[in-house]
Amino acid sequence: MTATPALVDLEDVRPQVDALLAGHVARLTTELGALGDDTAPLVTAVTRMLSGGKRLRAAFCWWSWRAHGGEPGTAEAAAVLRVGAALELFQAAALFHDDVMDDSDTRRGMPSAHRAFERLHAEQGLLGDAVRFGASAAILLGDLALVASEQEFAGALAGAPASRATAAREVFDLMRTEVTVGQYLDVLAQAMPWGADPDADEARARRVIQAKAARYSVEHPIVVGAALADADGPALAACRAIGLPLGEAFQLRDDLLGVFGDPSTTGKPAGDDLREGKRTVLVARAVRLARERGDEATVSLLRDHIGDRAMPDDVVTRLADAIASTGAVEEVERTIEDLAGRAFAIMAARAWPEPAASRLAEVAHAAVDRRA
């Protein structure tokens, strides 16, 4: 199963969230236009970032709210959709910043924002360093998206009962703090020596996954959706127990796609994570398994080339083949199955109403079974 748009179109979730995002772009166009024509490239970059994506976070939030008693067509439903838009705006901010830190060339099949602004610098014959200009513009774009995310979230909670607003705000604020710290832990992991202790490397990678990706991609959207339905403490705890392993499985799938994914569906060159030097669970396990069988040639190949941004395609292919030959892919697939299985078992035990129970399970399957 893949994360098809149909799963987030149900009950018009995606169209309504998209409409909210389009409204943000319209307001931004007016606000920035008042500052002059030079701001137009910023609007273009925001529009491009918001036009893509699966809207899975918004879908997790919506269907969790529905599973905990929320009813469509109500004032509360409109608030949940605005929270979904806030989550998507926060995702956009994270991607703008992440692409700078990873020095990524592409995002969803198009030049990443900092690369687009590097090109703008060259095309307009601007002074100074083009790379620094591009990175600065992308950082500011991320900040713009953060401002918009906060505005949308605050607007969604305006008029909500104090207890509901407090519960939802606590989740949202924790999410933002964790992602920021998780980004730092990811940058730190990529700067640290690695390969000598694969178990320690994997433990570090799992910490990054939990802080940077798992909770914010799945756990927090599910929990905030439940909080918006006034779910009690045990219900929120169950959402956390579902969301964390499901989120880890989501990111482990992303790590596999980062090496073995089809560029026509992922929107990024094959093996991009290898060039960027991602310290993933997949790589840590490949090193461990190679070392266990005495294959130091594979260990050296991985250590010598992962993180080489000038790596030619044939070497990327050699690295991917080497990782696959260790059995690391199968190990990671088993871990995904185990993590997702734990989450689905808890979901099955919840007395959630239909159609929310089935829809939430379908979105969860789409997140971990996807190929893009």
Image: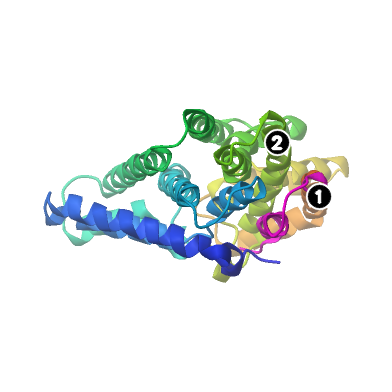
Give the spatial CA distance, label 1 vs label 2. 14 Å
Residue 237's image quarter? top right
Residue range (magenta) = 347-372
Nearer the observer, 300 or 48:
48
Q: Residue at x 26, y 49 (%)?
A: 130
Give amino acid for label 1. Ala
The image quadrant where one finds the C terminus is bottom right
Question: Is 369 placed above or below 249 here?
Answer: below
Q: For the residue marked with disc 2, what is the amino acid? A: Ala
Q: Is residue 98 left or right of residue 369?
A: left
Is residue 184 on the magenta stretch? no
The residue labelled by disc 1 is 348
Badge 2 density bin: few <14, some 14–19, many ≥20, Cα 10 Å: some
Instruction: Write down the residue under mark 2.
Output: 235
Q: Secondary structure at mark 1?
A: helix
Who's the residue at 48% across and 45% down the image? 102
Q: Position of residue 135 (x, y in %)?
A: 33, 45
In the image shown, does 192 or 206 lie closer to the viewer? 206
Q: Please, what secondary structure does the residue beneath circle 2 have? A: helix
Residue 364 image offset from top left, x and y in percent:
69, 54
Count residues near mark 1 (Cα–Cα under 10 Å), then give few for <14, some for 14-19, many for 20+.
few
Q: Residue at x 68, y 42 (%)?
A: 243
User: Does 356 sit above or below residue 216?
Assistant: below
Percent position (x, y) of residue 156?
Answer: 41, 43
Residue 98 in view in this figure:
yes
- Is residue 352 or residue 192 the one in the foreground? 352
Relative side of 86 to 317, left or right: left
Closer to the camera, 125 or 157? Answer: 157
